[in-house]
Image: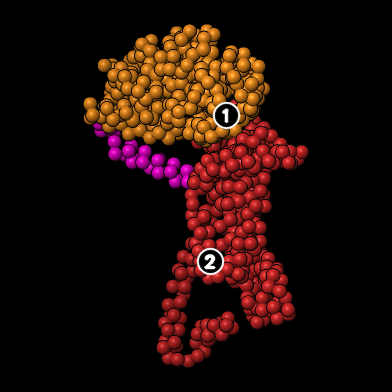
Chain colours: A red, B orange
Amino acid sequence: MSVTTGGIADRAATGGAGGSPLRAAAARAARRAPLADGAHAALLAAAAGSVFAVVLLLVYETWRGALPSLQAFGLRFFIGTEWDPVAGRFGALPYLVGTLTTSALAMILAVPASLGAAVYLTEMAPRRVDTVLSYLIELLASIPSIVYGLWGIFVLAPVLRGLVEPWLIAHFGFLPLFQGFPFGLGVLNAGIVLAIMVLPTIVSLAREVLRAMPPAFREAALALGATRAEAIGVVLAGARPGLMGAIVLGLGRALGETMAVTMVIGNSNRLTASLLAPGATMASVIANEFTEATEKLHTAALIEIALALFVVTFVLNGIARLVLHRMTKGVRDVAGAA
Amino acid sequence: MTRPVRIAAALALLAGAALAGPGAAQQLTGAGATFPYPLYSKWFDVYHQKTGVAINYQSIGSGAGIQQLKSGTVDFGASDAALSDAALEAMPRRVVHFPTVGGAIVLAYNLPTLRGRLKLTPDVLADIYLGRIQAWNDRRIVAANPGVALPKGPILVVHRADGSGTTNIFTMYLSAVSPRWKSSVGSGTAVSWPAGVGGKGNDGVSGVVRQTPGAIGYVELAYAKQNRLPYASLQNKAGKYVEPTMAAVTAAMDGVSKELQKDVRTPIVNSGDPGAYPICGLTFLLVYQDMKDPARARQLTNFINWAMHDGQSYAADLDYAPLPASLVAVNEHSLKTLLAAGKPLGAK
C-alpha cells in the first residue's frame, strides 16, 4: 500500500507522468517556488520553534525560580527529610517517596485490571459490550479529579477505616507496610484513587495498541494449533512495547495528579514505611503551600520540587515516545512483510 | 486548575482598577483575606446602598492581597496576619494596619459517645498536637474532664495542609503556651507538623473531623457551627474554662488593649482577661499611610470610619467578634495619621 502511494507522489513531484494539467501546475509552482517556499518554510519553522522555545523558557524560568533553593541545599535537597518553613530548612525526600509510592501502588492495582479489560474488549467482547464498556471507560476519564477526591474522602475512607485497614493490620500487621491506626486517609487511599484515575488512560491506549496489531499474529498462532489463550499471548507479546507506552503514560498521569491526592493522602511530611500512614506527594505540597509561601527560600524550594517533577515527567514522556516509536516501526515491518 | 483561576482573578482585578481610573472615587478596589470575606461583602453591599461608593474586593488570600497592595493595583489589602517588621520594610511606602473584627479558632472533635463539652488545658492541647498524647483516655485528658467517660480509641490530630492565617494564629497560641512547641515547631502560616493528617482549607479539616471518629482539628468558629461539630472549651490564662463566644473574643482583645495601643499588630492569643477565649486573632485592612489620590483617600477613610462604627453591628450575626471600644479608639487615632499626597486628610 505504502509503496504505491509513494510511487504516485514521486511521479507527481517529478512531473514524470505527463498529463498536461499536472505539468501546468508544476510549472506554476516552479515559478512561485523561491519566494513562496522560503516564506512557507520559515513560517513552519517558526511554529515548530515556538514549541521548543516554550519548553526552554519553562525550564529556564523554573530553574531561575528554584535558584535560591538550589544554591542553599544543592543535592541535599533530595535526601533531606525535614521540611520546616518556620526554620527555613527544606528537604524533599518525603515528597519524592510519596509520589513514587502512591504511583507505584496505583500501577500495581491498575495495570493488571486495565490490560485485562483492554484484551477483553479487543479479543472477546461482543460488539455491543465493547461499545458500552468503552463509553463507560471514557466517562471515567472525564470525571473531574475533585470528584474522585470527594469519593475518596466520603466513600473509600470509611470502607478502608471500617473494613480493609483493620483486616490488613490484623493479618499483615507484622509487615512495616501495614502498621499503624486505621484512619482511612493516607497513602493506601491515595494509591487506590489514583489507580481508578489512571485506569481509563491505560485501557483506552492499550485497546488502540491491540487494535493496531496486525491480524497475522493471531492467525499464524491459531494456524499453528495454538489455543485461543495462547494466541492472545502471542498478540500481547507482539504488542509489548506499545502496552509499555500505555502504562508509562498512565504512570505520568499518576505522578502529576494533584487535587484528588491532596484530598485523601493526609498531607504529612513524616517519612514512614506504612501505607496506612498519611503522606504527601510533590504535586500536593506545591498545591498546598505555594499560595501562602511568603519567604523567598520557601517559594524557591517549592519551585525546585516543580522542577524535579518536570524532569521526572519529561524523562517518562521521552521513554513513552521511544517505546511507541519502536512499536509502530515493528508494525510497519510486519505489515510490509505481510 | 488553580493557575487559570488565579490569572482570571488577576485580570478581573486589573479590569476593576482600570475601570475605576484616577479621580473616579466612586469605586474602590481591595484584595486579600478570605476569612473575613462574608462580613466584608455584607459591608460593601450596605455601604454601596448608603453612599453609592462601590468597593470591588477579591478574596484571593492574605499573601496575594499583600502582593497586590505592594504592586499598587489595589487601594487596600486585607490580611489575617499582621505584617512582620521585615515585610513592612519591604513595602514601597509606610503601611497602616486597621483591625476590623476578631475571630475565634475552635477545636472541633468527633467523639460520638461523649456527653457534654470536652475541656482542654493548654498543655494537654499542645501535647496532643505534638503527638505526645495519643489516646482519648490519657490520664491528663481525664483529669481535665472529671466525671466524663472518655473513649479508649486513638486521637487523630487534624491540621491545615495549606498555608493559612488560621494556622498562624493557632501555632502562635501553641508557641505562647508551650515552650516545647515553640522550640521544636514554632509558628507560621505553614509549619512542620509533628503529628496528624492535613486537610485542605477549613472545609477540608472540618470534613475529616466529621468523617473520622476520634478526630480533633482546629477550624474557624463559623465552620464548626455550619457543620454542627462540637468544639472544646479551653482553659485560658486566668485558669477558667471558656467557650468560644463573640463576647469571649472581644474580651480577649480588651485583655491586650494596652499592647494594642502601642502596636496594633500584637497577637491577641492567650489573653490575660478572665473572660477571654484564648485562641483568637484579628483581621486587618492594610492601607498606605500616604495615598496618592486625595479623592480616593477620602473615600477609603470614610469607609474605614464607617466600618469601625456602624459596620461593627453586622459582625456578630456572621460569627465575627466586634471590636471593643478600646480598639476602635486605636483605629480612630490611626485614621488621623493618614495623608493624601503628603498632606493630612482629617477624617470625619
- Tell me where residue A187 sits by quadrant: top right
Residue B9 seen in the current view: yes
Neighbour tally class for label 1: few under 14, some 14-19, many 20 plus, Cα within 10 Å: many
Residue B12 rendering spot, x and y as whole percentages = 36, 41
The tag on residue A129 is 2
The tag on residue A8 is none
Amino acid residing under circle 2 = Val
Comparing B247 with B323, the one in front is B247
Question: What is the C-alpha distance between the residues marked 1 and 2?
Answer: 45 Å
Question: Which quadrant is the C terminus of chain A positioned in?
Answer: bottom right
Per the rendered image, the range of residues in magenta is B1-29
**Main SS class of the magenta portion in the image:** helix
Residue B69 rendering spot, x and y as whole percentages = 41, 30
Q: Are marks 1 and 2 on the same chain?
A: no
Q: Which residue is identified by label 1? A: B215
Subunit ID for the residue under disc 2:
A
